[in-house]
Image (cartoon, rainbow, N blue to C red):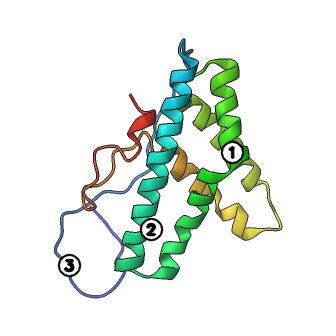
Amino acid sequence: MKGIIASPGMALAAPFMISEYGIVVVERDVTDVSGELARFRHAVADCNSEVEKLKEYVNASIGEEEAEILDFQLLLLDDTDFIGKIEEIISVRALNCEYAVKKVSDEYIQYLEELKDNDYLRERRKDVSDLSLRPQIPRPRPLRWSRFVCRGCHN
């Protein structure tokens, strides 16, 4: 195993491998649209709560400036356009929330990648990607969170 030394010194801790996740999100029809919307809204509330907790943890353990990197994710969770597009796919097309989140997130990422004159917004595409994967990715144990950060949108 190879790694990059980030700072001098020694640390003793359990290793945690960071890699890109190859998660496949399947489009499927839902029969209970109102139930699927409720499941999505519950997942949004869970994600908001967990990102807030993560921000508090980062603020306390690393610093306020570093914690501010999570502000964009919190803004996105409150963005009526972003959330509305997801809810529209769920309600109008009667599709599962995982697919709706992936589809809208991919559109936002594409838009942000095309911004040539705003480096800050172009760099936010990773935040959109991270946020869209929260319902599906098992989280590391150090914060003692449950297996899935946003359980509401994952079966």
Distance (Cα) linking label 3 and label 1: 41 Å
| Residue at the spot 48% in from the left edge and 31% down from the top edge | 39
Image coords of residue 63 (percent x, y): 43, 82
Q: Nearer the viewer, mark 3 or mark 1?
A: 1
Give the residue at mark 1.
82
Is 61 displayed left or right of 87 in the figure? left
Q: Which element type, helix, strand or loop, lies under badge 2? A: helix
Q: Nearer the viewer, mark 2 or mark 3?
A: 2
Is 110 displayed left or right of 74 in the figure? right
Give the residue at mark 2.
55
Give the residue at mark 3.
11
Q: Residue furthest bottom?
A: 8
Quarter in which the C terminus is drawn: top left
- The amino acid on which the numbered mark 2 sits, given as a three-letter code, is Lys
Whichever of labels 1 and 2 marks the residue nearer the N terminus, that label is: 2
Whichever of labels 3 and 1 marks the residue nearer the N terminus, that label is: 3
